[in-house]
């Protein structure tokens, strides 16, 4: 049985976090959280955030750019739906009580597009990357993506992915904001749905 820890509230980089009140200024109460883990790699959450209602009109498909030459601090190859993919972490930056993760998903296929849609979310109708998490293996804690509220209409502080396809030999740039681990934690593992786990990623 999991023993829940206190929520570690996160906000976008320029937001001022209110200590102990669990909210982002100007927004309803809510935020990301940390969970005590039973092992180094942790477990799945007990319950997923409420599913978002489908949009009344689907947005146009998002275009993806050719692969950019960003400075990569961690990388991992994986495959999904017959496509060869690569996750390139290009930033894990601490600012105050938040950490912002930036990464690229690269489609190594030469012929076919890869559709992201809800593959990195916590629900079927949830077109975001809110299932990505940070794992502190030393203190056995998992950090979830921050949210801007606690109600059913709350949204993650992360990339939206509805209609997003990564073209052959192209990439998509994504981000997510988390509550920051303690200052003495300088490396974490990053767990990506579909793409797997990247270990010992440095926090700058």
Image: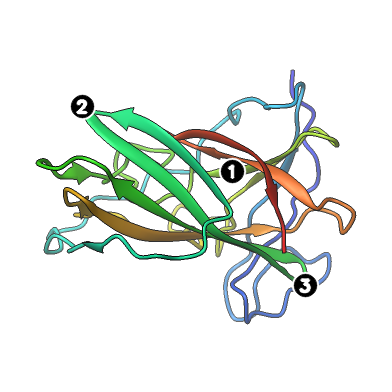
Q: Quadrant of the C terminus?
A: bottom right
Q: Quick check: 11 above or below 103?
A: below
Q: Quick check: 43 above or below 161?
A: above
Residue at point 9%, 41% (across, down): 111
What secondary structure is marked by label 3? Answer: loop
Q: Are marks 3 and 2 in contact (CB under 8 Å)?
A: no
Q: Are marks 1 and 3 in contact (CB under 8 Å)?
A: no
Q: Nearest the camera: 68 or 160?
A: 68
Identify the residue position indicated by label 1 in the image: 133
Say whether residue 67 is visible: yes
Q: How many marks?
A: 3
Q: CA distance from mark 1 to mark 2?
A: 25 Å
Residue at point 31%, 42% (across, down): 118
**Crowdedness of circle 3 by 10 Å Cα count: few (<14), some, many (20+)?**
some
Q: Nearest the camera: 15 or 61?
A: 61
Say whether residue 159 is visible: no
Identify the residue position indicated by label 3 in the image: 96
Find residue 112 and report its horizontal and vertical position in percent: 11, 41
Find residue 192 and report its horizontal and vertical position in percent: 49, 39
């Amino acid at each position: 049985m999991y023993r829940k820890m206190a929520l570690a509230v996160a906000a976008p980089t320029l937001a001022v976090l209110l200590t102990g009140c669990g909210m982002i200024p100007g927004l309803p109460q809510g935020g990301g959280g940390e969970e005590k883990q039973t092992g180094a790699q942790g477990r799945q959450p007990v319950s997923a955030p409420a599913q978002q209602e489908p949009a009344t009109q689907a947005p146009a498909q998002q275009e993806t750019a050719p692969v950019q030459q960003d400075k990569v601090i961690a990388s991992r190859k994986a495959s999904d739906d017959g496509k060869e993919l690569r996750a390139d972490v290009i930033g894990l930056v601490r600012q105050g009580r938040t950490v912002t993760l930036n990464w690229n998903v690269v489609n190594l296929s030469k012929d076919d597009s890869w559709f992201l849609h809800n593959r990195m979310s916590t629900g079927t109708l949830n077109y975001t990357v809110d299932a990505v998490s940070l794992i502190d293996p030393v203190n056995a804690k998992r950090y979830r993506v921050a949210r801007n509220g606690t109600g059913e209409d709350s949204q993650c502080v992360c990339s939206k992915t509805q209609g997003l396809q990564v073209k052959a030999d192209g990439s998509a740039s994504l981000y997510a904001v988390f509550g920051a681990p303690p200052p003495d934690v300088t490396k974490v593992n990053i767990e990506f749905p579909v793409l797997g786990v990247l270990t010992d990623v440095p926090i700058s």
